[in-house]
Each structure stands twice: as C-alpha cells, then as structure tokens.
Image: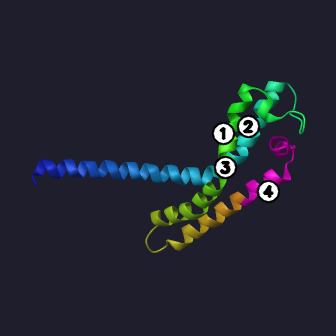
Amino acid sequence: MSGSNLILSAQRSARASKSLYGLRRLLLLFGVGYPALLVGSVYTTWLVAWAWLGHMPRPGLDDPKYIGLLVDIPYWVTGLFLMGMPGGFLLSVVAVPVLVARQAAPGARLTPGFFAFSALFFLWVMALWFLRADPWEVSLWFFD
C-alpha cells in the first residue's frame, strides 16, 4: 500500500468512528429520554386538544381520535411511542447501562453500569406511576 492509501484509509476509519460515536450518543439520549417522551407525548396531545376545543378535554366526551387534524398529529406520535414502549424499555434498561459501562474507565465499569440501570429503572417506574396516578385524568381521557 502506498502512503496516500494509508492516509485515506485512516481518514475513513476516523469518520466511521466519529459516526459510530454519534450513533451511540443518540442511542443513549433516546434510551434515557424515552420515559419522559412517553409521558410528554400524552400530555402534549391533551394540551393541543385543550387549545383546539377551548376547554379541558373531558374523559368519555372528547375523544382524541375525532377532535381534529391538529390533534391527530400528537395522537399518532403518542401511539407510536406506546407501541414502541417494550422496545424502548429494553433499549434503556439493557443497552444504555452497557454503553455507559463501555465508556467508563476499564477498572470501574460495574459501578456506572449499575447506576445507569438503577436510574433508568426508577425513571420507568416513575413514568408509569405518573400515568397511572393520572392527576388531571389525562390518561383516562387518552385511553377511553
């Protein structure tokens, strides 16, 4: 191999490594933020419906499927988040601790991975608890 081929090969390798790092970072952000995105999408649908109707959406009366086109967009996004919830849970509880542990120092990989697993499990429990507690009957309105 000539010197120019080696330089081009090293540049390609650096670009591939940089894009892989970006993909890992995106995977981490998505895995950590999934519970908040799930709750946020339900409440965004409710807020858009409130703005569209001019009053708080009422469970059993104002069905999010039939309010209007502006409500359909966050409604379908929320539906996609709900359908992807099992995969999102596995991504965050399995992949994120592994990725965090891989970025840690070689001698102390168990502690950051365990901390990431515990924090994500807590986030999921709190997100599901909040949707179940339903302080303003938003989940009841969305799922009726």
Q: Position of residue 130 (x, y in %)?
A: 79, 52
- Residue extent of the magenta highlight: 125-144
Q: Please, what secondary structure does the residue beneath circle 2 have?
A: helix
Residue indicated by mark 2: 44
The amino acid beneath tag 4 is: Trp
| Residue at image point 51% right, 49% down | 26
Q: Position of residue 78 (x, y in %)?
A: 69, 42
Q: Is tag 4's residue or tag 2's residue first in the polypeptide sequence?
A: 2
Q: Is tag 3's residue or tag 1's residue first in the polypeptide sequence?
A: 1
Q: Quote the CA–CA distance across marks 2 and 1.
A: 10 Å
Q: Quote the CA–CA distance across marks 3 and 1.
A: 10 Å
Q: Position of residue 133 (x, y in %)?
A: 85, 53
If the image is split into quadrants, where does the N terminus sit? bottom left
Q: Is tag 2's residue or tag 1's residue first in the polypeptide sequence?
A: 2
Is 37 rendered above or below residue 64? Answer: below
User: Where, by quadrant of the figure, is residue 68 drawn?
Assistant: top right
Residue indicated by mark 3: 83
